[in-house]
Image (cartoon, helix red, strand yellow):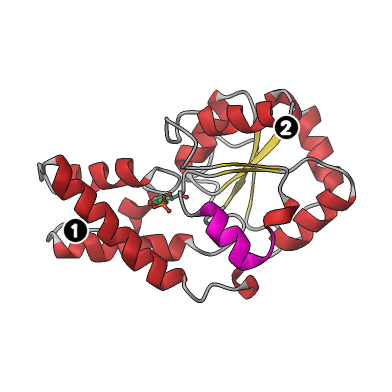
């Protein structure tokens, strides 16, 4: 979802950066790239590791709550205009053609965002951070999604903007369309710069690869 359907990845970045700043830990776009697709708790652990900071659990919970409070403030006004290019058209096209659609996200805020965008009803299943036990790069989120859709991984295509997500898809036996920079998402089956013009025919051809 974040960074694939809607431009919320930038709000996660801002909130994590604000948290890292408050801890005097350096946090760049390169650092952020490594948090994409990674759960809230694992994201915090990585930041603390970069800062060589060891904290007790109560403090970690406090920091995660703070980051999420800031994130929720940033996404308060999120609206359908912030959907990424081509994403809405593709979802509508797939729906019209009877293709099953699942959301696989590490975020615990997924349903709230889908509702703000008015697209929740387009998804046959939602597997998110409130359900999974192991965050991407573990393939659990996609394996559960395929299973809930009663499909085999080999018959699904995963869309991903995150290194961790591409890894999860590949390890789970899925074809994967990377959205972003080919030098970052090189493990994906194909990499595109955005979803404009993406069609069901292209998905069918990728499934044959
Ligand atoms: C979590 C993480 C964030 C990560 C996102 C992926 O979201 O906080 O770092 O990029 O998942 O979708 P949260 O559960 O905090 O919304």
Query: Measured from the top left, where is residue 68 in percent x and y?
Result: 34, 59
The outermost residue toward the right is 97
Task: Tell me, yes or no, whether the two marked residues, 2 and 1, touch with CB atoms within 8 Å.
Answer: no
Quadrant housing the C terminus: top right
From the viewer's perspective, tell me whether residue 37 is left or right of residue 88. left
State the mark number for residue 83. none
Answer few, some or many: residues within 10 Å of disc 2's Cα (few below 14, many 20 plus, some between 14 and 19): some
Residue 101 image point, x, y percent: 73, 43
Dot 1 corresponds to which residue? 26
Which residue occupies 74% across, 26% down?
Answer: 150
Residue 77 rendering spot, x and y as whole percentages = 51, 76
Towards the viewer: 109 or 82? 109
Q: Is residue 88 left or right of residue 29?
A: right
Image quadrant where residue 62 sits: bottom left
Q: Which residue is mark 2?
A: 149
Name the residue nearer the viewer: 73 or 30. Answer: 73
Magenta span main SS = helix
Q: Residue at x 42, y 30 (%)?
A: 134
Dot 1 alpha-carbon crowd within 10 angstroms: few under 14, some 14 to 19, many 20 or more: few
Q: Does residue 68 appear anywhere in the picture?
A: yes
Mark 1: which secondary structure?
loop
Q: Nearer the viewer, residue 118 or 21?
A: 118
Q: Is residue 14 visible?
A: no
Percent across and percent down for residue 167 are: 50, 32
- The residue drawn where x is 9% and y is 41% is 54
Q: Is residue 35 left or right of residue 87?
A: left
* Corner quadrant of residue 145: top right
Q: Which residues are magenta?
A: 110-119
> For the residue with label 1, is its CB less than 8 Å from the closest atom of ligand 1?
no
For label 2, the SS is loop
């Amino acid at each position: 979802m974040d960074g694939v359907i809607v431009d919320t990845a930038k709000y996660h970045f801002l909130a994590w950066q604000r948290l890292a700043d408050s801890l005097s830990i350096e946090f760049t776009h390169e650092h952020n790239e490594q948090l994409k697709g990674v759960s809230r708790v694992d994201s915090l652990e990585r930041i603390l590791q970069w800062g060589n900071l060891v904290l007790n659990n109560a403090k970690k919970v406090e920091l995660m709550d703070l980051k999420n409070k800031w994130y929720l403030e940033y996404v308060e006004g999120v609206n359908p205009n912030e959907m990424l290019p081509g994403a809405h058209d593709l979802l509508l096209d797939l729906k019209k053609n009877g293709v099953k659609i699942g959301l696989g996200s590490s975020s615990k805020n997924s349903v709230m965002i889908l509702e703000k965008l008015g697209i929740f009803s387009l998804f046959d299943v939602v597997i998110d951070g409130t359900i999974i036990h192991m965050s991407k790069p573990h393939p659990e989120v996609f394996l559960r999604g395929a299973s809930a859709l009663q499909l085999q991984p080999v018959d699904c295509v995963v869309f991903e903007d995150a290194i961790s997500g591409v890894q999860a898809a590949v390890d789970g036996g899925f074809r994967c369309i990377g959205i972003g920079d080919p030098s970052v998402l090189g493990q994906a089956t194909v990499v595109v710069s955005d979803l404009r013009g993406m069609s069901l025919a292209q998905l069918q051809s990728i499934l044959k690869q």
